[in-house]
Image (tube, grey):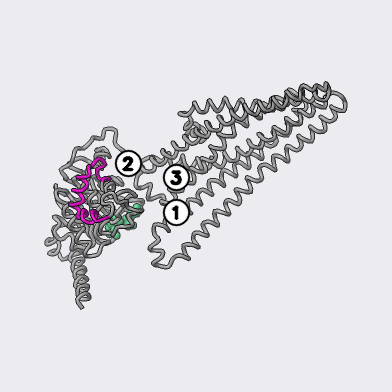
Amino acid sequence: MKPTLIRILGYFKPYWKLLVISAICSTIVGAMDGAFAYLVKPMLERIFAEKDSGIFILVPLGIITLFAVRGITRFTYDTSIKLAGQKAIQDIRNDMFASNVRLDMAFYNRNSTGELMSRMTNDISAMQEGIANIVTGLFRDVVSACSLLGTLFYLNWKLALVSFVALPLTAYPAQLIGKKIKNASGRSLNLMGGITAILQETFSGIRVIKAFGLETLIINRFKNANLNYLQQMRKFIKYESLATPVSEAILSFGIAGVVYFGGSQVMAGRMTAPGFFAFIVALAMISKPVNKLQGSYNVLQRSAGAAERVFQTLDQSRAITDKPNAVDMNRASGLVEFKNVSFSYGEEPILQNVSIKATSNQMIALVGPSGGGKTTLVSLLPRFYDVTDGAIFIDGHDIRDITLNSLVSQVALVDQETTLFHDSIANNIRYGKPDATIEEVTEAATAAYAHDFISQLPAGYDTSIGDRGIRLSGGQRQRICIARALLRNAPILILDEATSALDTESEQMVQRALDNLMVNRTTFVIAHRLSTVLHADKIIVLEKGRVVESGTHNDLLANNSLYSRLHSLQFKERDTDEMVYTQ
Ligand SMILES: Nc1ncnc2c1ncn2[C@@H]1O[C@H](COP(=O)(O)OP(=O)(O)OP(=O)(O)O)[C@@H](O)[C@H]1O
């Protein structure tokens, strides 16, 4: 694995031209600092020793020219290096987003949405701060420190040695503090991930929070998370603030030495007063870039903590990928077979030896007690997860031998989560087929019984849907999702409790839309309400991950076992409900 810094630099490679421009400019700026300190000596000599009046015109002119050139080069340096930094960060952000989106479902089970959002925002911001600091300051400060160092040695190398004798001593505490900063930075970003997770849960679950009066509870939870973050930041602030005083305390020995030895050299006539003054000016000037370099080192450590987390996410690889010889599958006829399928998310088996066969255009219903494994079973079909044992076939092809792209195009999913994006209604339907014309969109919406209500909206199909489609009713959102699935026109359809969150009237509308959607497709329907699957070609009863019964509604009723018990229980409930309504 490449070290973090090398990887960051790799992101700058495409922008090398900007780096070259900034390197040239920073060399000019830095060299000017050295030249300025060096010129102090001849200037003082000509004023005090030679009493040269011409110098009064030359020096101000020189100063103006020097600062004008410095200003222009500094501007060019700043703009080019900051632009390179922004471009590199943009590439990192794009790579991270693309890598996250492509990762398997298992990755999303392991990480909360809030944490993932925090990595995309807070971690990248921390990294960006480091990069901005390094790229804007580091190069210039190094050049400036080197040129001033050259001047110091040129003016009096013995005195220069005395002043820097203490410098190596600062390296150890600086390194120690830098390490602490890096660790504290990683921990604080972790805690920030927790804070973002609370934010995400709160704002997306605000209805439940209000309905249950959980405001105080959630506010306290947030306060605690914030307090933990503050405590971590306290350590961080302490280490960061300690860095400069520690190095300055050590460097004070060097300065004391300069005053002592330099002063005695002047007294003894081995050094001129202007020479000593120029030396002090150069020494005072060098403290600025040296201190900034120390600061940059600490920022570097902080962003290294963030960068390591960013690259960790970038390095996660997909477990589910195309085999080297995977084939593209044309539109399937819809023959689906689960053959001795077993599956577990972790240690515990969730599905055991499940075998189901569906011929083209059949409707297969999956029913059974909660937690029996119905959703898990259908998640294996688009390879959200791979089977632990056994195999799944579509038209006789093991789905692991087909390219993921062509597999995905065989399956459409409609579930309770009516996911709509912040976009127009037309575009939300188009997610089923990005190049669909507006006529195709309208046709799909009509078949999904959505056209009428969409036409009545102020902007029709161009109406923008707010976050999570908040302005539409549950049934309307569901019908837009059905229109999307219709447009996708996949031969295999998964309906996961698609109507369970709706009231009876909405359910009837959605059921009619679903009936249209199911035509000419092999459909797997997960339903708690058995009334919706009475006419299924085959009903599979799953209990504790095993198929315990299968057959048509009438077959299963005749068996007088789990299905018929569930059935009589539900119909008793319905009769009771009807009695309550009619009273
Ligand atoms: N992402 C996951 N990670 C770990 N375990 C999971 C995951 N999803 C489901 N499970 C577990 O797998 C088992 C089967 O869950 P699944 O959702 O497939 O059942 P289900 O029959 O669809 O249930 P329900 O009818 O309540 O929706 C449960 O014990 C559940 O806790």
Q: Contact, CB < 8 Å: mark 1 with mark 3? A: no
Give the CA separation, mark 2 to mark 1: 27 Å
Helix, strand, or loop for circle 2?
loop
Inspect the image, locate mark 2, and give the three-letter code of the amino acid beneath it: Ile
Please provide percent x and percent y for residue 381: 25, 47
Mark 1 sits on what residue? 197
Q: Looking at the image, tell me whether mark 3 or mark 2 is earlier in sequence order.
A: 3
Q: Contact, CB < 8 Å: mark 3 with mark 2? A: no
Point out the frontmost of discs 3 and 2: 3
Numbered marks: total? 3
Inspect the image, locate mark 3, and give the three-letter code of the amino acid beneath it: Met
Helix, strand, or loop for circle 3?
helix
Q: In this view, does 285 lie to the left or right of 115?
A: right
Inspect the image, locate mark 1, and give the three-letter code of the amino acid beneath it: Ala
Does the beta carbon of the residue at mark 2 sit less than 8 Å from ligand 1? no
Mark 2 sits on what residue? 320
Point out the frontmost of discs 2 and 1: 1
The residues colored magenta run 430-457
**Residue at x-position 55% and y-position 29%:** 76
Mark 3 sits on what residue? 120
Please provide percent x and percent y for residue 284: 73, 34
